[in-house]
Amino acid sequence: MSDDLIQTIINDDRQRFLLDLEFVQTLANPQYLNFLAQRNYFKNPAFINYLKYLLYFKEDNYIKYVRYPQALYFLDLLQREQFRQELVNATYCRYIEDQQLLAWQRLQRRKNQLLNNATGLAASSSTTNNNNNNEAETPNTQNSTNAISTSTTTNNTQLR
Amino acid sequence: MAEIVQNTNLGTRRKLDLLLQEMDTICREIISQLYNSSSSSSTNSNLNTQTLIDMFIERQNYLSQQIQIVRQQQELERQLQIKRDEILKCDRALRCLQTYLLQAVQVLSSAVYQAREKLSNIRRAKTFPSETIIRYAHQLASCYSTVAPDNWQQGDIRRPYPTNIDMRRGLLGRISEQILQQQQQLSIQNSTINTATVVDMAVPQNTSSSYTAVTTAVRPPKHDTTSFASDIFSSINEETNHTNFSSSDTDSDDDL
């Protein structure tokens, strides 16, 4: 019966895509990676081929569905044998998780700093300097979005 | 004496010194002559008292002239000092401006370099409509996947990746739950087959009914929650017209 369920999912394209999408996003969880490593999933060549197949999520059409872009970074790392071997260590996975959380919080702090600078610039300007400050604000917000986006996606995009 | 006074190469101080020395010697000469003339009536020396006194008066006039000159020179020196102070001030100001200029040059050069890099990036980049990018940025920001929420503290269960709860609610979680339940059912079935001998005919129906009963008891919460992937998918499909992936001819990249 379980095979039937899996068969129904595989035969339905929508369900299969959802399955792939879910799985690829779970790769952002270092504890889950540790779980997979300790159960020898990474020793299975079929699994490694599946990981290679999942790289299609980096294309433009599919990346727009990914909500946890760090998963793609881990997907790239998982293509390497050495990383897969290291993931068996729980301490290594905890280290990765700590770094993830610290980076997460650091970006939040930077975002707040940039927002405060932008509001500070706007507040301290006089009415005659409004035009200059408008030009100063947009580079700040662009810098903030650039700073945040460069750490997530690797695609080059342009604001038109 | 006139040549000395009019000599422009000698400084005023030197001239004053010479004048004072001469006046000093003339005074001594006058006094010694007066002393000698009082003691003995000698023949007149070359320099009689009258000429000495004339010389003295002449030197006194020169002295007063020199003192006037000294006063003028003091005034000039004062002016010079004022000008020197102004020059120092201007010099300091110029140094400040020079440091500002150097800083501005550094900042501008780095800004120009970065602007050039940005432009070259822009030229190489793929273009997307800004609407798409803003929508994607909103999507990423709304689930706090890259930037932490502002009120996040230690002990908050939110994470930048799908957590255990999210994973169990998803499609993979549901599949694994179903497989576990089926395995449990099979083990129950095996145990009932081993113990019961009479009710063989009824067993299949019972297990199937109990199977359905168990699943219906457990299923309802699972039906209500949808996987986080299907959430994304359904929200995206609400905004677009197509859901079919196998035929990509209707795919339009403009809408997300």
Image (spheres, grey):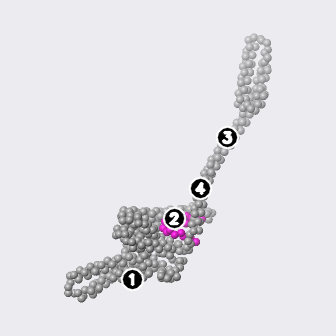
Instruction: Give the label, 2 or 1, closer to the camera.
Output: 1
Q: Does B54 appear above or below B68? A: above
Q: Mark 4–mark 3 contact, CB under 8 Å?
A: no
Mark 4 burial class by Cα count in 10 Å: few <14, some 14-19, many 20+: few
Taking depth in this image into account, of A25 and B216 the one nearest to the observer is: A25
**Residue B225: which disc?**
none
**Residue A8: which disc?**
1
**Which residue shows up at 79% across the image and 20% down it?**
B50
The total number of labels drawn is 4
- Residue at the bottom extreme, as displayed: B201
**Residue A147: which disc?**
2
Q: Mark 2–mark 4 contact, CB under 8 Å?
A: no
CA distance for labels 2 and 3: 57 Å
CA distance for labels 2 and 4: 22 Å
Residue A146 colored in magenta in the image: yes
Which chain hosts label 3? Answer: B
Which chain hosts label 4? Answer: B
